[in-house]
Structure formats: C-alpha cells, structure tokens
Image (cartoon, helix red, strand yellow):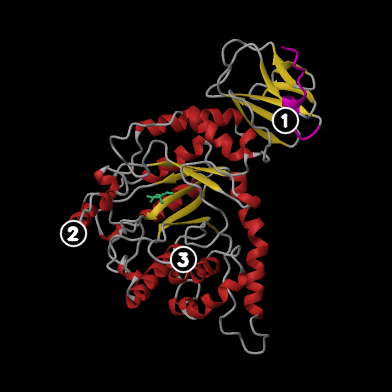
Amino acid sequence: MSENGITRRDLLKGAGATLAGAAALGPGSILPPLTEPTPAGQQPGAAEQAELAREEATRAQRMEWWRAAKFGMFIHMGLYSVLGRHEWVMEDEAIPVREYAPLNNVYDPKPGFARFWARLAKQAGQRYMVWTTKHHEGFCNFDATGLTDYCAPKHAPGRDLVREYVEAARAEGLRVGFYYSLMDWHHPDGARCATDEAARKRFVEYTHGLIHRLMSNYGKIDVLWYDVAWPLTAEQWESVEMNRMVFKLQPEIVVNNRNKLPGDFSTPEQHIQASKGGQAWETCMTMNDSWGYQRADDNWKTAKTIVRNLIACVRDGGNYLLNIGPRYDGTVPQKSVRILSEVGRWMARNGETIYESDPCQVTRSTYASFTRKGNTLFMHVHFWPGEYVAIGGLTAKVKSARFFATGQELKFEQNRFRARITGLPVGAPDHPATTIALECDSVPTQDMDFVRNNMPRDGV
Ligand code: GLC
C-alpha cells in the first residue's frame, strides 16, 4: 500500500481494457477512458466521468503557474557526468553495463549541490527546475530500493539525491520538476520488451513502479517530464494508465508529451517553434551542444543569444527550459554560471517584460525583438544602432516611449509607415539588450504588407 492508499495492483489493474477505450477520447486527451470497476449503486463510469471532467477542467488552472513562469532550469546529471562525454556516451561508445555501472562508485554529488543549482536558477530569473531523476542509462538518482538497487542510496552517494534536490528547489521558492526517461539501457528488458510480451509486462510494471515512487515520496511535484519512449508504443507503455496514476497521486501536476500522449504541453527541442492551436509549449535547449557534462564542449551560447531565445519563446507564448550539465560532484561549469548570472542581471532589470507578457505579433527587425503586455510593446534592442531606432509597419499609435529599466522618457515621431525613437545615446545603454517600452493606443501589431504596397515609390 502506498502513502496514498493505492496499491500497485490497483494502479495497473484494467490497463488493457483501458487502452481499448482510449481512442474514444480522441488524440487531444491525456486522460484515461472509463474502465475501472464502478462502485455499486452508481451509473457505469460515473466516478470516472467525474475524474475525467475534473482533469480537463483543471488543466487551465494546473497550467497557470507554468504559463506565468516562462523560464526554467533543466539539469542533466547522472553517471555519465563522471565520464564527461555527454549523456549518450554509454550507447554511443557501446560501453557494456559491467563496465559502465561501476561509475556509481565514483559519482558522488557533494552535500549542498542542489542548493547551489537552486540559487543559480533563482538568480537567473528561472522559476522552475527539471532534473534527470533517471536518464537513459537507467541509474536512479532517487531511492528505488525494492525495484532496483541501481540507485543513489545504494552506491557512492549513499543517500537520496532527488530528496535534496526537491528541498533545495522549494527553499528558493522554485517549482519542482522531474525528468524521467522511459528508455533504459541498463534494465535487462529495456530493449527486448519490444518483441517479448513477458519482458514488456515486467518492464512496464517496473517503469510504472518507479514513476509511482517519484510521485509518492517527495510531496507535491509540479512537472513530470517524460523522455524517449523507445521502443514501445503508447499502448504498450500503458501510457494512459501511467498518466492516470500520476494525476491520482499528483492532482495538480503538469506533464509533457513524451510518453506518446499529448500531455499538457509539447516539447520542441533545440529550436523555437510555437505549437499550433494555442497548445502550451516549451522549448528545451542546451547552453553549449551537450545536455550532460561534456568536458571539451566549448560551443557556448552567449548571454545575448540566451536572452534573445527567451524573448522569442515568450513572444510566441512559450516557455524556455535552459539546460546546465553539472560535473559528477554536482558543481556547475564556470562558463554556465557566468552566462546565467549575466542573464540574471538582465532579468533583474527587465524581467517584468518577460513574465508579464502576452503573445506578440510584432516580429520584424534585424536588431531588436519584441514582447508585449496589453497595449505596450517592448522593443528589446540587441544590436544597438545608436541615435535612433525604428519600427516599420506599426499599426497602433505610440503614446509614449521610455527606457524600461530606468523609466527615462524618450522622444519619438510616427507616420503611417514607421515609428522612430530619437535622441538616443550612441552606445547601448543596457546589455545584452536594451528594452524600450512603447505605450500604444491599442494592441500593437505590424503590417509589413501595408508598407510594401503603399510606400511611395518615386524612382525610375
Ligand atoms: C533528447 C536526448 C536526451 C535529452 C533530451 C532533452 O531526447 O536523447 O539525452 O535528455 O533530449 O530534451
């Protein structure tokens, strides 16, 4: 019996029949169909109908903090961090389990490791964290005893690292997310589950069991971030039942789409692309080219690139989940710390234009990008031209202009084709971008077709 009074058997019971009914819910639903035994005296499915309706109805509410958070910290750290050659090193170099597993004698994050991460995230303006509780390598950073001994308390760390992480995030007022890889290179059934039904049953029970553990043992968890569902289908993973268990244990959680169900949000990786139809989305991205610690990867993004990416996500209504890859002792590479600190200083001055923003239609500029709150357009100038900046095709009338960070009023002029902010200093007042707030008489949009078609042409 779990803390919540639900047994594993209860949770897995009826999963087969459940899947048969899943199609009826349509592809947009993460919710399970209605196949649990109905308590006597009720209409068939009434309790389940209510549960289903509740999940749908609460989505907007469950997602509210997440939509407002905008910026999160992703953390990849596991046994791969010992080798420092990316989290795919085990498969990419075809390292056998017997050679790889002993890394758990070396992997040993220092006490307080997660407090450093949480403080760094907070300072950077990030509002939630998502750590790899188990990556593809199969090693559990949490107490998984009873299901597997391949977990932190049983090896060098000698303690539940996930617990420390959860406590650290909460201490900084950050929301807590768990990344969990369904694919597993360590479990004996991790590949053969695709072709051997008995193996599949064992492996799915193991997987649901670990997720159950994560959802039961650490209090309220805010995000469950599934990853790589190879080699099974949603049906074979019993993903509907998996989510149902998760919501039963964590009614306020939000889940992503990588257990092959749509989930609460989609997860474009290493690129920024808004989802269609207003569905919530989150771009996850590395700061260099690797998620897990890769000692020699020096291809770092600048703070400017990161600020521009964050603006691009927020402008189109998405979130930005930015990764760090700590070393095996939990310390964060200096370069990431420096970049995040620079981003944080900018966020301290300009964060309001990020957190409290609505989707923004204005995009066209080669030296600035935009966010918006109501009728106010925020122009974030990353390549400062000096003296004046201009926006073509602005349809709304500008009422006032000011530097956002200092409140200093600025001069401007506007005709049907362009708005110009004038009398600006030659050097950029802020780094990595200077934010100018343009208060308009209506929602600012941009119409470049109007400019193209109507600008007077008077050449030959
Ligand atoms: C990919 C990689 C994985 C990483 C993830 C982050 O799925 O396989 O290593 O954790 O991206 O989104």
274 in relation to 445, above or below: below
Identify the residue at horizontal 43%, vertical 42% (top origin). Answer: 323
User: What percent of the width, then of the height, locates residue 349?
Assistant: 59, 28
Q: Nearer the viewer, residue 232 or 137?
A: 232
- Front disc: 2 or 1: 1
Comes first in the chain, label 1 or label 3: 3
Query: Which residue carries the number 2 mark?
Result: 98
Q: If the image is split into quadrants, where does the C terminus sit?
A: top right
Magenta stretch bounds? 442-460
Q: How many labels does the image show?
A: 3
User: What percent of the width, then of the height, locates residue 327?
Assistant: 31, 42
> Within the image, what quadrant is residue 286 found in?
top left
User: What percent of the width, then of the height, locates residue 79?
Assistant: 28, 51
Look at label 2 and name its amino acid: Arg
Query: What is the residue that sits farthest to the left in this orientation?
Result: 99
Comes first in the chain, label 2 or label 3: 2
Side (left or right) of 324 relative to 153: right
Q: Which mark is residue 449?
A: 1
- Front disc: 2 or 3: 2
Q: Distance between the residues labelled 2 and 1?
A: 63 Å
Comes first in the chain, label 2 or label 1: 2
> Within the image, what quadrant is residue 181 found in?
bottom left
Q: Nearer the viewer, residue 191 or 348?
A: 191
Looking at the rendered structure, the secondary structure element under dot 3 is helix
Look at label 1 and name its amino acid: Asp
Query: What is the residue that sits farthest to the front in this orientation?
Result: 460
Q: How far apart are marks 2 and 3 (CA)?
A: 31 Å
Q: Which mark is residue 216?
A: 3
* Residue 448 on the magenta span: yes
Look at label 3 and name its amino acid: Ser
Q: Main secondary structure of the magenta part?
A: loop
